[in-house]
Amino acid sequence: MRTADQLKIKLFMDGAEIESIRAAIASMPHIKGFTTNPTLMRKAGVKDYAAFAKEAISVVKGLSISFEVFSDEFFEMEREARIIHSWGPNASVKIPITNTRAESSIPLIRHLSADGIPLNITAIMTNDQVRAVGQALHPDIPSIVSVFAGRIADAGLDPVPLMRQAAEILRDRPKAELLWASPREVLNIVQAEETGCKIITATKDILAKLPLLGRDLTEYSLDTVKMFYNDAAAAGYKI
Ligand code: E4P
């Protein structure tokens, strides 16, 4: 069993708290990039999108960081994308696979990628979408293809075969990195690596469990027994 240090897949942190991003940069050398989304930003209390993004870009010291457009109109998404891109070469522009009317973002993706803008295509859940994105992305422009494996699992489906097929679809697009978004448990990091994903983005709660990766199970069992014993003692339980 691999430990965190032996992983080949790139680990990104998913979140929108500046202090967590700063802490990851200071003390988690295995974090190779960051992702955000409007939901995470709202949850973190971000009020000023551009101010947050610019501060985050300065904190991550050149590592990849993704920021999502939020308009529902493609011409406006394009405007937002170009502004996000202007903030730094390491800022990837997240484009959802459709707008809220289920209209495809593929023409916009093709257009922005042809203009050399690094994109992160988000909210993908089918391999028809992966195929269309793979064909739309410019082969020379670094891009991220975010398949929402965690939500696929939330829907009661095993994301592993789908992710393996997605990796196969993108095989001839080496600049389009398949990203597993996002693990519900540490096991998913191992699965993401085994299915051929290049990146996995995880919240700080999952990243905090990384030292468990590859633990000896006999030791882990004993630690668990000790935890129960110590908590019962600390609580002063008596029967
Ligand atoms: C990825 O970039 C997304 O921000 C993230 O993985 C979404 O994950 P969720 O399905 O837990 O919301």
Image: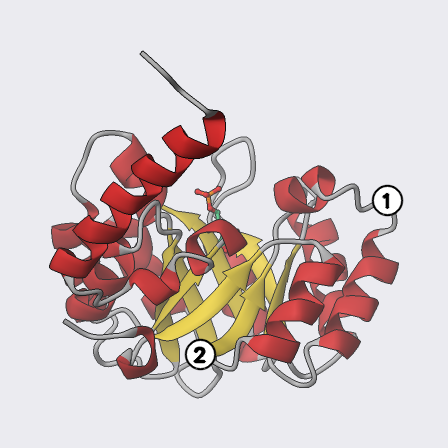
For disc 1, the marked residue is 47
Q: What kind of residue is marked 1?
A: Lys
141 on left or right of 222: right
- Disc 2: CA contacts within 10 A as few (<14), some (14-19) or many (>=20): many
**Disc 2 beta carbon < 8 A from ligand 1?**
no
Distance from Cα at disc 1 to Cα at disc 2:
34 Å
Residue type at mark 2: give it.
His
Q: Quadrant of the C terminus?
A: top left
Q: Is residue 204 above or below residue 62?
A: above
Determine the residue positioned at 63% across, 77% down.
25
Up-down relation of residue 229 to residue 56 (above or below): above
The mark closer to the camera, 1 or 2, is 1
**Secondary element at tag 1:** loop
Which quadrant is home to the N terminus?
A: bottom left
At x 14%, y 57%, the residue is 217
Q: Residues within 10 Å of mark 1 (few under 14, many from 20)?
A: few
Q: Quadrant of residue 199?
A: bottom left
Residue 125 appears in the picture as rendered: no
Residue 74: mark in rendering: none
Left or right of residue 162: residue 8: right
Residue linked to disc 2: 138
**Residue occupying the point 79% across, 41% down:** 45
On the image, which quarter does residue 17 sit in?
A: bottom right
